[in-house]
Amino acid sequence: MKRNYSVIGVVPARLASTRLPEKMLADLNGKPLVAVTAENAFKSGAFDEVVVATDSEKIAQAVEKYGFKAFITDPELPSGTCRVGEVAKIMKADVYVNIQGDEPLIDKDGLINVAEAFTDQNVKMATLSFPLRYEDENNPNAVKVITDANKDALYFSRSIIPFPRNHELFAPLKHIGVYGYRHETLLTLIDLPACALEKTESLEQLRALYNGIKIRVIAASKDSVGVDTHADLERVRTLIKQ
């Protein structure tokens, strides 16, 4: 679809990580993980440009080697959204899409659909979801989302929502952490204080809902595969070779 607005993909990438130290620089079949993520995002065709927002010169140098522009952001910034917001203050675009740096096996169709959601002038933010696996219903790391009739998010939670009293009536959705924002919405969002819901669930997207910013939820064509551990890294290495 030909668009009359510009879209920049931003990959926030912090150097520090707990379970897999410096995972953004982990070797993924000869390339750093974050560079593979950026390359796959750009190959999707969803964006006019893909850049990396990082707190680390090491990461900046690693992605610049592969032709991607890197922005050094304040290491004290509390979230990836804030890093994307820093880019938005420097690079002008109509829409920005926040792409998780540790998810190199990107749903390319999903990225395109998030970018194209903004052809609807009513959409201020957009994200992705995928059917929740039964074994993840009680997994707090698998964030759940429920939507209204317009596919706008009603709530995100680490708990199962809605409560499955009549399980067969509703198929729970897993939230996939790709976010699209209009320029003005993003700058508004990063200036808002964290709300109690956000702090309770440790889910920054609840700040948007709490303040009346609707989030359009789009069906992803495949589940996300994140890299948090050495086992995850080996799994992704295998999948990329297939």
Image (tube, helix red, strand yellow):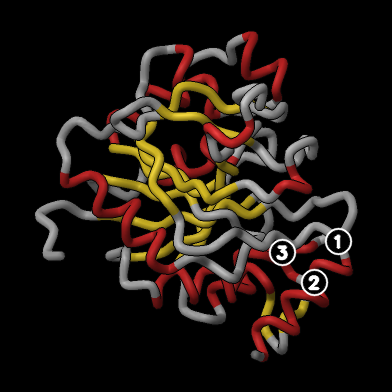
> At which x and y percent is residue 129?
50, 46
Camera-side residue of 25 and 126: 126
Mark 1 is surrounded, within 10 Å at the Cα level, by few (under 14), some (14 to 19) or many (20 or more) other residues, namely some
Q: Amino acid at mark 2?
A: Leu
Using a 10 Å C-alpha cutoff, classify the residue at mark 2 as few (fewer than 14 neighbours), some (14 to 19) or many (20 or more): many
Q: Which image quadrant for residue 78?
A: top right
**Depth order, front residue of 113/219:** 219
Which amino acid type is shown beneath numbered disc 3?
Met
- The mark found on residue 233 in the picture is 2
Q: Position of residue 173 (x, y in %)?
A: 56, 41
Location of mark 3 (residue): 24
Q: Earlier in the sequence, mark 3 or mark 2?
A: 3
The answer to whether the residues at label 2 and label 1 have Cβ atoms under 8 Å apart is yes
**Residue at 29 percent of width and 30 percent of height:** 150
Please say if 144 is above or below 45.
above
Left or right for 152, reference 203 = left
Q: CA distance from mark 3 to mark 1?
A: 12 Å
Q: Depth check: 222 or 124 in front?
A: 222
Foreground pick, 114 / 223 = 223
Q: Residue at x 46, y 78 (%)?
A: 67
Question: Residue 122 lies in what quarter of the image?
Answer: top left
Q: Is residue 227 left or right of residue 64?
A: right
User: Considering only vertical position in the picture, is 90 above or below 225?
Assistant: above
Q: Which residue is mark 1?
A: 229
Separation of residues labelled 2 and 1 (CA atoms): 6 Å
Dot 1 amino acid type: Thr
Q: Residue at x 63, y 13 (%)?
A: 197
